[in-house]
């Protein structure tokens, strides 16, 4: 029957396809590394109206560079565009216009971006800098950086990393980790000399040796313990790895600037060369930029000690044949507090001298001899680091990612588990989104050894970049049973040239009750699939086509089923039964509606229908009132006197408030009922993405109807279709009588009453209370008091009050704390948090084993 309802919806609701183009790449103030020919291929990507079949772009030179007039680029399909434009070094603005058959349907613009020079700064504290020093910022608009700093606590939260950039002015950070130091001012000088913009990224980490860096780079994240046992979500290599994975893979790079050696007072020349060689090789393999350049500074001095062996190693590493070049020698800045206030860290009043050493080496000859690294392609999604670095099978992990390629409105970001060599082990699904760029998913219990994850998009389908490895320890065995097909698919008939939005039934189950994901392959021309939903406009030739539906469980085991899709030409289909017309005369008919056998009965111009139950034969499972919906091009009609056919009673006018029986697996609740509003949600499991109409009755008399069609994210998380099932109804004067009024909210044309019965509303005449907060109306989880000392109470929205709930606490540094929550009622749980340490925690909430929400809780 759900197909019948969707067919009805398609016939009568034609939504206009409107929208504006949106540029997702370039992002504001980004700088792309130029080649030694002073040019870069700039990626241009974004969203546009689905009617667009051509994209033109115009780059206007703001400062330096060369303008390029309207140029057609790349490909445009189904509302996304992707292409590139070759530009010379300079600072630009961008305009994009979307065309449909030569007519403009949308336009969008970007304020500024650049083609120029990109550097990443790495090493230890003298190159990390301090936010409290007299730092030297940029004054030229063309010097860019990332507005993020993990310093001083060393905890980079990758989910918060920005995709756009800022001007390196006003002592801004050099993200993701460094402080300004003198890089802004050096950027001014380079921009003035080279005539192109400059981007700096920071990946340094204080107090670390060459062996620390090599160990972290090769063996995984080196989690450093401070006093008190706190695990920092950082490491010598991780800030550099983040800069490379999230940004350099997209921008390209001139060089990594390496200044380190002060923590290696007794390291041999060979050991230092070996450690930094491993580090350089890791940076190149991680990005795929196999000749990434490094500038190796000569630095060892700390509290009266220098190490000539390390200086020799640094000179050895600065090998132009390996695209590595010598950086400044800084050991001379020593011997008195005029140079280093603590005999280790360079004084901020010496920053101009420190800066000058770099500027003097970045000569025309240096830029001619150093080989820049330009990415072969721009990744759409990059996936970050998993913490803690070692996890148990069955644990929930939070997967950070950055997405810059365009996606459609029905897109989901989903997570895959991979082996260390890239083999897909399991699909972990969409999990629970924590903010915009963090997904909480559960590891399979059998996950073991070095594993990786990646985030993919579903619409359009794109694979993201694979994360760095982490260690999993198995806690159970891997299920061996694949999903099964529970019933075969009936043929589906579609009309050429008629738009389709069709949900195929999920005719599968999993023996281990694992969640299933779906894909459809071998679709005929004009159709595309997102999960089990088919959309598009059939094109090409008439005839039957066999497509494949694939169901895959969380262990990456799958099963296939076939569906025959018949393309037919438009116009009237000649019926084959005794009845030669699908008119509106009363009678009983057996219909074939979009390939599904349906009994129908006409009474006084209304159509009632029941569908076939595969186990029980034909039965009047439900009756649908649908005036004037018959379309001979989509229906084959047969007269029938089948005894299974039960004629419904004669329908009555909807205005009387009486009901006709309508099929549905309804769930719903009245969350808020006061003298201002009645609000809540209702959902029909038979048609999970369709809104439901409600009737509000006073003492059994219909007073109004309201559509439950407002979006609520908590319903999406609870698995209630697309989430457009909320309602808010302003209480009318007729319910404000000064006395107690019985009120009923029920699904239109059914006997389903929300909350299971009638409630009484007592409102003074003309009363109006304050509108409930958006939080209450949204039906979200809440924790109070917050901050809390001994106990927290968790408020449960009605969408989850029938679910099996569990809770967990995770500290900001990744520690998992036990949380035992108890409830004497369905709408609240209470938990004792007195044993845990003071600090900020994330309260994770699970319904039926799946993550559904997270809240920040401050323990005092």
Image: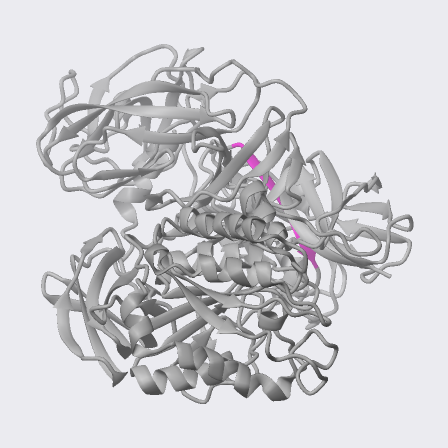
Residue 56 appears at what percent x and percent y?
17, 67
Whether residue 525 is visible to the viewer of this picture, yes or no, is yes
Which residue is depicted at the point 26% across and 75% down? 94
- x, y (%) of residue 442? 60, 36
Tell me where residue 70 appears, x and y as whole percent.
14, 73
- Observer-nearest of 49 and 751: 49
In the rendered image, residue 671 lying in the magenta stretch gets the answer: yes
- Kindly tell me whether residue 708 is visible in this rendering: no
Q: Is residue 395 above or below residue 853?
A: above
Q: In this orientation, which residue lies closer to the viewer: 497 or 66?
A: 66
Give the quadrant of the C terminus: bottom right
Look at the image and give the residue range highlighted in magenta. 665-673
Residue beneath the point at 32% across and 59% down: 373
Query: In the image, is residue 11 part of the stretch drawn in magenta?
Result: no
The N terminus is located in which quarter?
Answer: top left
Magenta residues: mostly which secondary structure? strand
**Left or right for 665, reference 501:** right
Q: Measured from the top left, where is residue 851 in percent x and y? A: 63, 41
Total marks shown come to 0
Q: How is the image coloured?
A: one colour
Q: Nearer the viewer, residue 339 or 281?
A: 339
Q: Name the image quarter holding residue 559.
A: top left
Residue 235 sits in quarter: bottom right
Along the viewing direction, whichever of 766 and 249 lies nearer the viewer = 249
């Amino acid at each position: 029957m759900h197909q019948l309802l969707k067919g009805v919806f398609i016939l009568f609701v034609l939504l206009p396809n409107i929208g504006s183009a949106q540029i997702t790449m370039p992002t504001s103030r980004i700088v792309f590394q130029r080649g030694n020919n002073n040019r870069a291929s700039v990626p241009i990507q974004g969203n546009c109206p689905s009617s667009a079949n051509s994209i033109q772009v115009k780059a206007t030179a703001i400062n330096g560079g060369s303008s390029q007039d309207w140029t057609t680029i790349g490909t445009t399909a189904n509302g996304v565009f992707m292409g590139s434009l070759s530009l010379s070094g300079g600072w630009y603005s961008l305009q994009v216009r979307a065309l449909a058959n030569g007519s403009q349907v949308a336009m969008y613009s970007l304020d500024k971006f650049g083609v120029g020079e990109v550097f990443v700064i790495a090493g230890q504290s003298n190159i990390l800098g301090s936010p409290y020093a007299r730092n030297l910022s940029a004054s030229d608009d063309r010097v860019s950086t990332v507005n993020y700093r993990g310093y001083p606590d060393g905890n980079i939260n990758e989910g918060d990393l920005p995709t756009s950039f800022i001007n390196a002015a006003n002592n801004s950070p050099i993200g993701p980790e460094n402080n300004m130091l003198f890089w802004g001012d050096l950027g001014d000088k380079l921009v003035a000399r080279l005539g192109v913009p400059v981007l700096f990224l920071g990946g340094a980490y204080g107090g670390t040796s060459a062996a620390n860096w090599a160990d972290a780079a090769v063996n995984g994240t080196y989690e450093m313990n401070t006093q008190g046992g706190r695990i920092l979500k950082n490491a010598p290599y991780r800030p550099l790895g983040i800069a490379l994975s999230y940004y350099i893979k997209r921008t390209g790079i001139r060089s990594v600037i390496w200044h380190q050696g002060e923590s290696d007072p007794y390291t041999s020349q060979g050991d230092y060369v070996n450690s930094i060689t491993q580090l350089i090789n890791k940076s190149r393999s991680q990005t795929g930029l196999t000749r990434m350049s490094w500038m190796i500074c000569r630095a060892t001095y700390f509290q009266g000690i220098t190490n000539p062996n390390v200086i020799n190693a640094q000179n050895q590493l600065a090998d132009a044949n390996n695209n590595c070049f010598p950086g400044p020698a800084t050991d001379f800045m020593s011997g008195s507090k005029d140079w280093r206030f603590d005999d280790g860290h360079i004084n901020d009043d010496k920053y101009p001298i420190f800066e000058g050493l770099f500027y003097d080496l970045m000569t025309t000859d240096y830029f001619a001899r150093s080989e820049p690294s330009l990415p072969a392609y721009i990744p759409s999604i990059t996936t970050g680091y998993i913490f803690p670095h070692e996890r148990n099978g069955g644990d929930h992990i939070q997967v950070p990612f950055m997405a810059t390629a365009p996606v459609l409105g029905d897109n989901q970001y989903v997570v895959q588990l991979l082996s260390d060599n890239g083999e897909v082990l399991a699909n972990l699904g969409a999990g629970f989104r924590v903010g915009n760029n963090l997904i909480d998913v559960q590891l399979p219990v059998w996950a073991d050894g070095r594993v990786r994850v990646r985030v993919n998009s579903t619409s359009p389908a794109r694979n993201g970049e694979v994360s760095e490895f982490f260690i999993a320890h198995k806690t159970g065995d891997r299920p061996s049973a694949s999903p099964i097909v529970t019933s075969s698919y009936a043929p589906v008939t579609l009309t050429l040239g008629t738009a389709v939005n069709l949900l195929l039934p999920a005719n599968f189950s999993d023996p281990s009750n694992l969640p299933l994901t779906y894909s459809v392959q071998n679709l005929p021309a004009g159709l595309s699939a997102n999960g089990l939903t088919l959309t598009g406009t059939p094109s090409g030739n008439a005839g039957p086509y066999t497509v494949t539906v694939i169901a895959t469980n969380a262990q990456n085991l799958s099963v296939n089923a076939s569906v025959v899709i018949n393309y037919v030409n438009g116009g009237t289909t000649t019926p084959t039964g005794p009845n030669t017309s699908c008119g509106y005369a009363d009678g009983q008919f057996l219909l074939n509606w979009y390939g599904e056998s349906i009994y129908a009965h006409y009474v006084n111009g209304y159509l009632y229908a029941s569908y076939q139950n595969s186990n029980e034969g034909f039965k009047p499972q439900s009756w649908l009132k649908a005036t004037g919906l018959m379309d001979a091009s989509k229906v084959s009609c047969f007269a029938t006197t089948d005894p299974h056919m039960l004629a419904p009673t004669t329908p009555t006018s909807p205005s009387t408030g009486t009901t006709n029986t309508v099929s549905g697996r309804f769930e719903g609740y009245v969350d808020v009922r006061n003298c201002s509003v009645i609000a809540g949600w209702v959902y029909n499991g038979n048609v999970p993405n369709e809104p439901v109409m409600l009737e509000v009755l006073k003492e059994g008399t219909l007073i109004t109807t309201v559509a439950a069609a407002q979006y609520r994210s908590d319903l999406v998380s609870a698995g209630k279709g697309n989430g457009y099932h909320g309602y808010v109804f302003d209480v009318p004067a007729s319910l404000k009588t000064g006395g107690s009024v019985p009120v009923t909210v029920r699904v239109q044309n059914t006997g389903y009453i929300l909350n299971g019965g009638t409630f009484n509303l007592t409102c003074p005449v003309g009363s109006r209370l304050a509108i409930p907060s958006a939080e209450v109306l949204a039906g979200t989880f809440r924790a109070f008091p917050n901050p809390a000392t001994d106990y927290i109470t968790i408020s449960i929205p009605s969408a989850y009050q029938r679910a099996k709930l569990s809770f967990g606490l995770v500290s900001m540094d990744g520690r998992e704390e036990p949380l035992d929550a108890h409830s004497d009622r369905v709408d609240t749980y209470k938990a004792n948090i007195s044993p845990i340490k003071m600090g900020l925690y994330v309260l994770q909430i699970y319904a039926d084993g799946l993550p559904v929400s997270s809240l920040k809780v401050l323990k005092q």
